[in-house]
Image (cartoon, grey):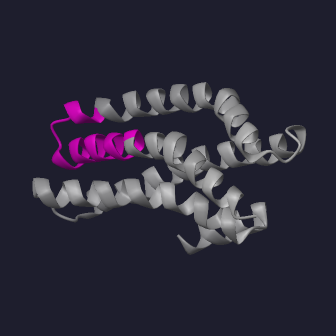
Amino acid sequence: FLLISLCMLYLFRSARILISSLIPNIIPLIITAGVMGWAGVPLKPSTVLVFSVALGIAIDVTIRFLVNYKQELPNQNQDIKATVIQTIYSTGISIIYTSLVLIAGFIIFCFSDFGGTMALGWLTSLTLITATLTNLILLPAILLSIGKKK
């Protein structure tokens, strides 16, 4: 997690962007951990693997969104709202398609007879669904709110 944070800080050179990028990626992990506790899924190497795999995929979506946001900002005359809207239009569909393909790939693991593989499938799918939603709903909202403080 620290390595990802350092890479994001280097990439975007902004503590505000770093924090706004981490929030939508921490929430899906917390939700998945809560569902694991609620469902009685024990912490084992196969279930802990979910967090690193899903975080890696989710942060990729966040980076794609934020890179496009940073590229669009000058084109929109530094208008945060217009930039966020344009970024959603330009990256939203590709994020949804990518996420659907990955979720479909991990859901196939749910049909395994091996418990660890089955848990990896449904937990990763749950995390990816939540991460897609937070990256498409919460991340733009955070960008709009931090943009108003400038």
In this picture, residue 11 sits left or right of residue 1? right
Labels in figure, total = 0
Give 43 or 92, whichever is nearer the viewer.
Answer: 92
Query: In terms of image quadrants, where is residue 11?
Result: bottom right
Residue 123 forms part of the magenta stretch: yes
Which image quadrant is residue 126 in? top left
Which residue appears farthest toward the left when viewing the image?
40
Query: Which residue is found at the position 67% from the left and 67% from the top?
Result: 16
Q: Nearer the viewer, residue 66 or 81?
A: 81
Which region is colored magenta?
Answer: 109-129
Q: Residue at x 23, y 64 (%)?
A: 44
How far across and down, in percent of the image, does residue 41 sit? 15, 57
Residue 103 image position (x, y, % from top left): 40, 33
121 is within the stretch colored magenta: yes
The reply, left or right, for residue 29 in relation to residue 34 is: right
Residue 68 location, x and y as percent? 75, 41
Q: Is residue 75 above or below residue 48?
A: above
Q: Residue at x 44, y 50 (%)?
A: 54
Say which quadrant the C terminus sits in: bottom right
Does 100 appear above or below 10?
above
Tell me residue 99's x, y (percent). Answer: 48, 33
Check the image and report above or below for 10 versus 99: below
Classified by dominant secondary structure, the portion drawn in magenta counts as: helix
Which residue appears at 65% of the width and 60% of the height?
Answer: 146
